Image: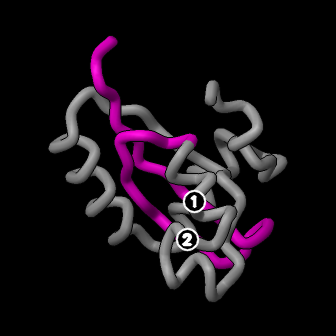
Amino acid sequence: MDKVFHVYMLASGRNGTLYVGVTGHLAHRVWMHKEGGGSAFTSKYGIKRLVWYQEFQSALEAIAFEKRLKRWRRAWKLGLIERENPQWLDLYETLNQ
């Protein structure tokens, strides 16, 4: 199986504080955030809900998209989440762990 990479967004709640990240193992990385060890920022603001993610075939592609996404206006990020996950469900439960 080829290695895949993910760009993902976490939220503290619907329309809450957002966090954008990139990882080579999505389920494990989100689990780390949920346990309070993902990053100081997510731990401080209670950002634990996986609300959006996209798969990439290369680390370079994923990192480039993450950097671009971080520069997006908040409204654009919210629109992306709303289009793909209008209920703001925690997608962590749907991951093949």
For the point 52% across and 67% down, the residue is: 38
Q: Position of residue 18 (x, y in %)?
A: 59, 71
User: Which residue: 66% across, 85% down?
Assistant: 45
Q: Amino acid at mark 1?
A: Met
Is 29 positioned to the left or the right of 86 in the image? left
Q: Which of the numbered marks, if any, corresponds to residue 71? A: none
Residue at screen point 35% across, 41% down: 24
Q: Is residue 76 left or right of residue 87?
A: left
- The residue tagged 1 is 32
Q: Quadrant of the N terminus?
A: top left
Q: From the top left corner, tell me how far across and down residue 33 is, in percent.
A: 59, 64
Q: Which residues are magenta?
A: 1-27
Describe the element under mark 2 as helix, strand or loop. Answer: loop
Instruction: Specify the farthest residue to the bottom.
Output: 44
Toward the top, the furthest residue is 1
Disc tally is 2
Instruction: Tell me the CA gap for discs 2 and 1.
Output: 5 Å
Relative to 11, 70 lies left or right: left
Residue 14 painted magenta? yes
| Mark 2 and mark 1 residues within 8 Å of each other at the beta carbon | yes
Residue 89 image offset from top left, x and y in percent: 80, 47
Q: Nearer the viewer, residue 12 or 78?
A: 12
Q: How is the image coloured?
A: one colour
Q: Is residue 29 above or below residue 57?
A: below
Residue 61: quadrant of the picture: top left
Mark 1 closeness class: few <14, some 14–19, many ≥20 residues within 10 Å: some
Q: Earlier in the sequence, mark 2 or mark 1?
A: 1
Say what secondary structure mark 1 lies in.
Answer: helix
What's the residue type where badge 2 is placed?
Answer: Gly
Mark 2 residue crowding within 10 angstroms, few (<14) / some (14–19) / many (20+): some
On residue 37, the disc is: 2
